[in-house]
Amino acid sequence: MLLTLGLPGLALFSSCVTPYQPDTVSSPTALVVEGLITNQLGPYTVKLTRTADYAYTSLNLLETGAIVTISDTVGHQETLQEQTGGIYSTQPGGIQGVVGRRYKVRIQTKDGTLYESDAELLKSCPPIDRLYYEYQYDPSALTNDKANLWHVFVDTKDPITPGDFYRWEWTHYKFLDYCAIEAGTENVGISCCSNCWDITHCYSNCINIQSDVAINGHAIIRQPITQVSYDDSAPYYLEVKQQSLSAGVYNFFKRTAQLISNTGGLFDTAPRNIGSNIHILNKPGAVAYGYFGAVGQSEAHMLINRTQAHGIAVYVRVKVDPFAPCFVCENSAYRTPIKPRWWPN
């Protein structure tokens, strides 16, 4: 997984990035780099976008046609393949992060500009000792999906060494009965041509980090991860990633979270305030934002039983048309035909 900072997996920036748009000030465009490598199996992803000229109202632009390479300090490297616009991925079975090595990304854009990150040390991550949930019912809530909530927590143990930093993120997979809605209808579905799962990532306003400054060497108990609502009576499948960050990645996430909290968007104020470990090698005056990091990672999964909920689940029932041609399940960041690794048989 990679910096999902939207900058996913840093799996981080995709849904938190909005352009800074003052009325009269013009600012040069800048490359935004988002990516992480971990000690878990890839593929890993690097996302490249480019900020629009701040004098205009525009979305960040996808940076296509770049050459993106991840390498370590002992000579291993891999050139990523562009999957969709601005999204570059390693191959399954390709390069994998190793604890104790340093990793960096090198990028050559179509105009020949070279960018390179600092080499980040990949630190080991303690295991998730316990992943669990607690059910809460609030009869005063306005809707039944919010009246029934399942709060998810993690317990882990911080090493006795000082200077450890953590991040938690989650991914939810939901099995689909249909992959599209028939044109002209609102609740008639078209079946999938294969098994298919929707993917929900923890992206927007979801930077969950902690330093061990106050708890060094002690247990981390009841670390909040997410809360699940009653939108369906089926079990809720959840994967949780616990990451051990470098000080640089931690501070980047911390400043990003503060920026989002204060303004509502990463680029609503000058993004230079959040820092970056991306450097331009051959074009004075060029600007880059974002962070490429290396993180140790532990993973766990769970199924949340929602049968103890009160009332009826809040969701729209869709009737599948048995005669319509099936719809192909795309393989993307938000949908996949590949069964999640811990999905129950």
Image (cartoon, rainbow, N blue to C red):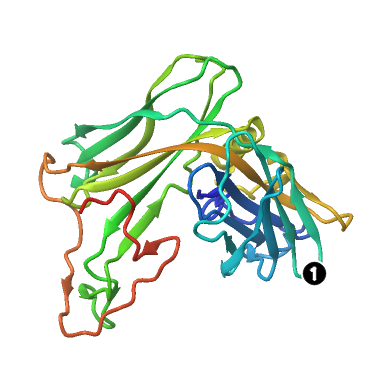
Of the pair 103 and 87, the residue shown nearer to us: 103
Location of the C terminus (image quadrant):
bottom left
Q: Is residue 143 visible?
A: no
Residue at figure coordinates x 19%, y 36% from the top left: 140
Give amino acid for label 1: Asp
- Percent of width and height locating residue 341: 33, 51
- Percent of width and height locating residue 178: 24, 70
Residue at figure coordinates x 31%, y 61% from the top left: 197
Question: Pointer 1: what residue?
Answer: 111
Residue at figure coordinates x 19%, y 34% from the top left: 138
**Looking at the image, which residue sits at the far right?**
284
The quadrant holding residue 250 is top right
Say if 109 sits above or below 263 in the image. below
Residue at figure coordinates x 50%, y 39% from the top left: 207
Q: Relative to 189, is 18 on the left or the right?
A: right
- Percent of width and height locating residue 215: 50, 15
- Percent of width and height locating residue 14: 54, 55
Of the pair 131 and 224, the residue shown nearer to us: 131
Of the pair 199 and 310, the residue shown nearer to us: 199
Say if 183 sits above or below 107 in the image. below
Q: Relative to 112, is 100 on the left or the right?
A: left
> Crowding at label 1, few (<14), some or many (≥20) Cα neighbours within 10 Å?
few
Q: Relative to 56, is 194 on the left or the right?
A: left
Q: Is residue 43 visible?
A: yes
| Total marks in image | 1
